[in-house]
Amino acid sequence: MVSTPKEEDGGRKRFLDLLEVSPERAAGVLAEAHSGDAAAWLVEVDEEDAWRVFSILEADKQADILEDAEDELTADLVAHMSSPDLREVVEELPSDEAADLLAEADDRVVEDVLSSMDAEAAEELRELIAYDPESAGGIMATEMITVELGKRLGDVVKEVKKLGDAAEEDLGIFVVDGDNRPVGSAARCYFTPCS
């Protein structure tokens, strides 16, 4: 849920006030804020303060903020992250966002992250990283499922639900014929509620 301008401004002021007193409490305000607001507030503070507060957050909140952050903030925060911390954040993101994030990191850190991941996921990310970020390949996600034409809707819903948290909002669901040729597609939101 996006905050109203008044809520956003009140949260921003509270964050900035707490930052001077307690980075931990300021991080608590960030954790409760919409990730877009949190990213905007971090841009307003110096790089060291932004890192100090950001580093306190859980990996899932860090991932949310980095998805909404401007490129400069993302680059600054990723530059401070250790390989294990970056790996935790990468594992929270859809493959296309993870590849974009890794593009901001030092080559050595990227290799450390990828070598510590599941081999299949690491290979997927290596393929995406190889594309120019502005090309079609550089913006694609690899999360998808295929469904045979004529499959019952209830069976498709069960398959999507089996993915659980891995079923991103933009998960591609592709309908294929008996020869595995695409004949259509649908968004996950068509089958299960999207947040």
Image (tube, helix red, strand yellow):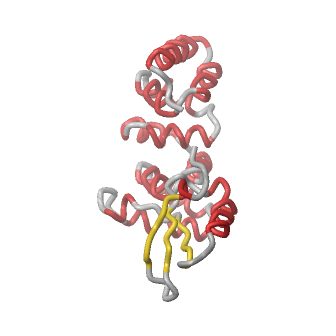
In this rendering, would 122 be left or right of 46? right
Question: Closer to the camera, 157 or 95?
Answer: 157
Judge left or right: residue 56 versus residue 140. Answer: right
Residue at the (52%, 55%) spot, across then down: 94
| Quadrant in which the C terminus is drawn | top right
Question: Where does residue 97 sit, x and y in percent of width and height?
Answer: 46, 52
Against 10, is 104 above or below? below
Looking at the image, is 112 positioned above or below residue 152?
above
Count of number-bearing discs? 0
In this rendered view, identify the residue nearer to me: 117 or 151: 151
Q: Residue 129: percent from the left, percent from the top?
A: 41, 62
Nearest to the observer: residue 34 or residue 145: 145
The x, y position of residue 51, in whole percent, is 52, 31
Image position of 187 (left or right of 118):
left
Q: Residue at x 60, y 22 (%)?
A: 29
Kindly identify the residue that appears in the image at 56 percent across and 54 percent down.
Answer: 168
Residue 124 at what x, y percent from top left? 51, 68
70 up-or-down from 6: above or below:
below
Viewer-proximal residue among 158 and 98: 158
Q: Residue furthest bottom?
A: 179
Residue at position x 41%, y 35% from top? Answer: 73
Residue 125 seen in the current view: no
Kindly indicate the quadrant of the structure image that contains residue 153: bottom right
